[in-house]
Amino acid sequence: MALVISDMSVSLDGYVTGPNDSRDNPFGDGAGTLHDWLFDAATDDDRALLRQAIDVTGAVVMGRKSFDKCVDIWGEGGPLPGVPCFVVTHREPPERYPSGYTFSDGVAAAIGSAQEAAGDKFVGLHGATVLQQALPLGLVDEIHVHVVPLLIGGGTRLFDTLPSAVELERTDVLVTPAATHLRFRVTR
């Protein structure tokens, strides 16, 4: 079965978005540089890490909030064109949306469908809420965080609502000028 990996950029104070995130302001106030390690500030090491993540991802699971905020940015095919994207939602899908998205009621169902679609590749989790729902259910195998040298001071925390401690084993660390890239295996 495909491994499930959460892969998120996060500020040093633990936020994945700033306050007031919306469709017009998808990363929120003060979080404009949160993903610069992917673009403007990327080094060869950052680009290699991103390329590796893209190459091994066979399906993506995201929350409805992420979909609603970013679907116009991603357009057809989702965040990784050609890779199926499963959206966790408890509401009806929008009447119209680009191809490449499947809507699922509940995180477990979305991850199960994504694992089937991913084949021998990985399932990438995108969004703090999806991670916070999947982790206590034992559905996450690895957590990759890209800690950006930024203090946002508010917004959406990556690990805000976990019901209990989760033990991790650090498997890799890469430090670049743009971010500290940390990889952990979830121990069960």
Image (cartoon, rainbow, N blue to C red):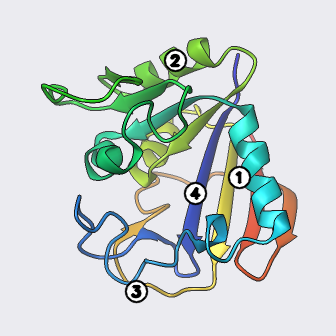
Looking at the image, which is closer to me, 153 or 30? Answer: 30
Q: Earlier in the sequence, mark 1 or mark 4?
A: 4
Mark whose residue sits in front, 1 or 4: 4
Q: Which mark is residue 138?
A: none
Residue count near mark 2 (Cα–Cα under 10 Å), binned few <14, some 14–19, many ≥20: some
Name the residue tied to disc 3. Answer: 153
SS under mark 1: loop
Q: CA distance from mark 4 to mark 3?
A: 18 Å
- Residue shown at the point (23%, 73%) measured from the top left: 20
43 sits to left or right of 92: right
Q: Which mark is residue 112?
A: 2
- Residue shown at the point (43%, 84%) measured from the top left: 152
Q: CA distance from mark 2 to mark 4?
A: 21 Å
Q: Classify 120 as above or below 62.
A: above
Tags 1 and 4 touching, CB below 8 Å: no
SS under mark 3: loop
Name the residue tied to disc 4. Answer: 8
Looking at the image, which is closer to me, 172 or 69? Answer: 69
Inspect the image, locate mark 1, and give the three-letter code of the amino acid beneath it.
Answer: Glu
Q: Earlier in the sequence, mark 4 or mark 3?
A: 4
- Residue shown at the point (39%, 32%) measured from the top left: 76
Q: Earlier in the sequence, mark 2 or mark 4?
A: 4
Q: Which image quadrant: the C terminus? A: top right
Q: CA distance from mark 3 to mark 1?
A: 26 Å
